[in-house]
Amino acid sequence: MDLPNLGLGRTTLTIGDTTATTTGATGTYEALKSGVIVSLTVGEKITPNAAIVLGRAFTLAEVIALWEEFEISDEETYKLITGQDPPSVRDMALYGSWMQSPVMSALPGAAMPTYQLVGLAQSDTFRVSNHLRAWFQIEVRPRLSTDADVFPPIGAPPVDNGLSWTLPSDKLYVSAKGNDGKREYRATGSLMRFFESAVQFINAGVWEYRYVLRLAKK
């Protein structure tokens, strides 16, 4: 069937029947008029990068990619451009690479429960559409490099009250909106080991961690 003529983009190619969740759909739309692009960009409904794509003949697959990369702000704008629903609900998180935990030194027991604070490496720099606001989390898990690895590692098991993480306020960076309509986010966290009994030395890489940037609309 013809793509619906409800949207701002007008199809120049007839394509087969598709559902809203189809990711392999093809079809070419005429470029949006410059006035429409300016209006959508100024209103922060699309990013400057999306404006470039939509300012020339574009495909449905390209619009889907813009949607998945948060270059289109909301479902209504997507429908306005294509005349149909977006393909899926977007995963509102960006994941950094897993990194090895740092060394944790041995410490004597304490009269009251306390914690050991160890600095982590800085996160990747994430570029996020200004349509969204973001916040960091840190995930920690045992590092199992080979199929034969187990946790706790061979030897004396770690004795503590658990691990958590913290994100010092002065180690969080969010840039102003750039010319591409995006902000940069990065952070440097710390790993916390809680204890009251004496805790032993732990080698680097017994644990691994990654930064997660959670995203939400403004």
Image: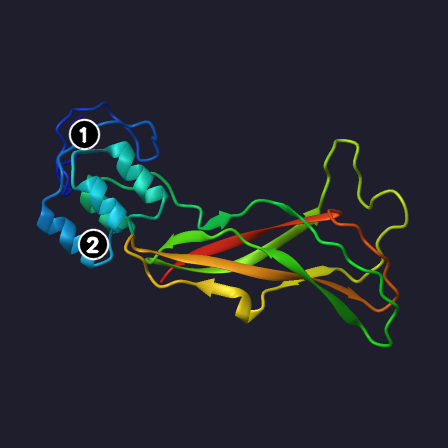
In the image, residue 81 above or below residue 188: above
SS assignment at label 1: strand
Residue 140 x, y percent position in the rendering? 66, 52
Which numbered tag is attached to residue 65? none
Pointer 1 local density, CA inside 10 Å: few below 14, some 14–19, many at least 20: some
| Picture quarter with the N terminus | top left
Residue 113 x, y percent position in the rendering? 80, 72
For the residue marked with disc 2, what is the amino acid?
A: Thr
Total marks placed: 2
Q: Residue at x 45, y 58 (%)?
A: 185
Q: Quadrant of residue 16?
A: top left
Q: Is residue 191 left or right of residue 20?
A: right
Residue farthest to the right, as pictured: 156
Which numbered tag is attached to residue 28? 1
Residue 47 x, y percent position in the rendering? 27, 51
SS assignment at label 2: helix
Asked if one can make out residue 30 in the rendered structure from this viewpoint, the answer is yes
**Residue labelled with disc 2:** 41
Q: Quadrant of residue 109?
A: bottom right
For the residue marked with disc 1, what is the amino acid?
A: Thr
Asked if one can make out residue 83 in the rendered structure from this viewpoint, the answer is no
